[in-house]
Amino acid sequence: MTAPSPTRVRTARRQRGLPGRRRVAPYLFVLPFVAIFLAFSIYPLIFTLRLSFTNWHGAGGAEWVGFGNYLYLLGNDAFWASLANSGVLWLLIVPVQLVVSVIVAVLLNSTKLRMRGFYRVAFVVPFVTPLVAVAQIWIVLFDQNYGAVNAVLGAVGIPHIGWLVTSAWAKPTLALLFLWKTTGFVVIILLSGLQSIDAALYEAASLDGASRVRQLWSITVPLLRRSLMFCVVLQTLAVFQMFAEPYVVTKGGPYGSTTTAGLFLYNHISRADLGTGAANSFLLVIVVMLVSLVFVRLLRAKD
């Protein structure tokens, strides 16, 4: 029996080593993502959670206070007032935005609408416009004495309204800013959901004599539940994190009526009260999760 050639021996060794390499290769490919995720997501989360149980101002050693920061916030009227302000803004924004976005998305999805591409771009432009620039425009438009909105109202005999300096009107004015800025994004999400609905369903409903309104309520809305659920969760998170709008437009006033949960959290950070700020952020996460879970439960599609 002849001995195997050196070439065959080397080939056999390579083949025996291939299964091991194939098992290791996928982990090597995902290693950069895992490393970045651990370094910039998991570690900051754990560090912030630990920080929430301490009294630390950014320098020196951190003093362990246990649940002291959480108890302080739960007993702080200003904390609950910021959550209430965000809750009112949520009621002014999210339901209105969903109704308007569904109607606009249905119109933009219609093949009979001329210049559909232009309208789709027009609805996205506010979303990509820098927020600070939009907020400055809002200040000019809704100024009590020299704003364009009050000038138009004065031309028809309506007295000037303190849009940004009265507690009754400051929240609706901020809500209008948020609606104008983000509704286009929600429309695009719902539009993508509409395009996945089979047109045969609408044809069958038309043959059965269903009106457009009936088709919207019985076909479009049920089949858009997943997209609507995603939008509710996304916008709930955005509303409770709202910071730039009240910070630039109203500075949280008048009388704290527009101090949102996000702005209240920033106040702790600006005073270098990092332990209380960390506890505030985790309480805010819990509130947003609970609100989101309620609406996910309500909007979840039934089997």
Image (spheres, rainbow, N blue to C red):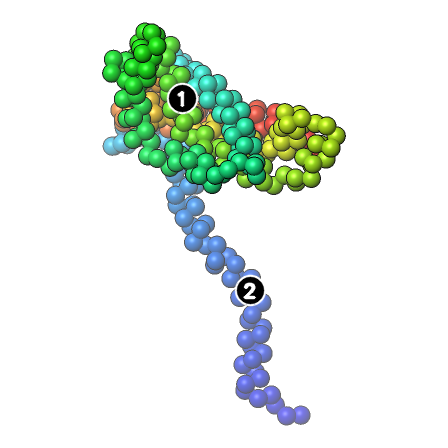
Q: Residue 268: percent from the left, percent from the top? A: 31, 24
Per the model, the C-alpha gap separating discs 2 and 1 is: 56 Å
Does the image show residue 11? yes
Quadrant assignment for the N terminus: bottom right
Looking at the image, the residue that sits furthest to the bottom is 2
Left or right, 209 with respect to 96, comes to right
Local secondary structure at mark 1:
helix
Q: Residue 292: percent from the left, percent from the top? A: 53, 27
Camera-side residue: 273 or 189? 189
The amino acid type of the residue labelled 2 equals: Arg
Label of residue 176 in the image: 1
Left or right, 60 with respect to 194, comes to left
Other-residue count near label 1 (Cα within 10 Å), few / some / many at <14 / 14–19 / ≥20 = some
Quadrant assignment for the C terminus: top right
Q: Which residue is mark 2?
A: 22
Callout 2 touching callout 1 (CB < 8 Å) = no
Q: Residue 65: percent from the left, percent from the top? A: 36, 24
Q: Residue 288: percent from the left, percent from the top? A: 48, 26
